[in-house]
Image (cartoon, rainbow, N blue to C red):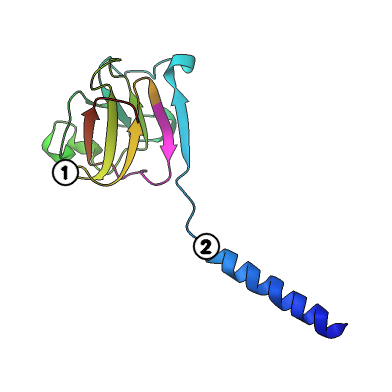
Amino acid sequence: MHKSIRWATGLLTAAAAVGAFAAPAHAETSWYNGGQRGVPTDCWKGYLCVWKDTDFQLGGWGVARFEHSNANWTKTPMAYMNDQGSSWYNNGHPGSFSSVRVYEHADYQGRSLCLDAGWGATWDSDMNDKGSSNRWFDGRC
């Protein structure tokens, strides 16, 4: 009896250890539907808007607005938001080139966050303080 209890305990311990080394969790994203909740303050029509803090809070900074695709945010008037954004909203026009992907690195490289028109993210664990480029595209995320 003691032998089978020790064996079962050892098996459970091994299973727990394997679980501890499982694949990393996927990004947590807090999605925001502008069609149901309204467009966040100061996000102009046709723009990707980026805020310094979560939940569309300014954090002492202005809203960064990107109307076109940008391979490197440091080469735009919105350079201050490079690797600083914590929430995003796509206020693009429905139709062609209405979806936008925000990339972790310049030149559309690294991890990304994709937003269809009318959608935002009040926070994303993988992209927090990491946006450096954005690309508008035709189609949905």
Residue 96: % across, % down: 24, 18
Q: Residue at x 28, y 37 (%)?
A: 102
Nearer to us in this view, 130 or 52: 130
Q: Earlier in the sequence, mark 1 or mark 2?
A: 2
Nearer to us in this view, 96 or 108: 96
* Label 1: how many Cα within 10 Å (few below 14, some 14–19, many 20+): some
Farthest residue to the right: give it. 1
Is 44 drawn above or below residue 3 in the view shown? above
Farthest residue to the left: give it. 75
Label 2: which secondary element: loop
**The magenta stretch spans which residues?**
120-130
Q: Which kind of residue does numbered mark 1 sit on?
A: Asp
Quadrant of the drawing holding the C terminus: top left
Q: Quadrant of residue 85?
A: top left
Nearer to us in this view, 137 or 39: 137
Q: Quadrant of residue 62?
A: top left
Tag 1 residue: 107
Whether residue 59 is visible, yes or no, is: no
Label 1: which secondary element: loop
Tag 2 residue: 22
Instruction: From the viewer's perspective, tell me whether residue 33 is left or right of residue 13.
Output: left
Whether residue 54 is visible, yes or no, is: yes
Nearer to us in this view, 120 or 77: 120
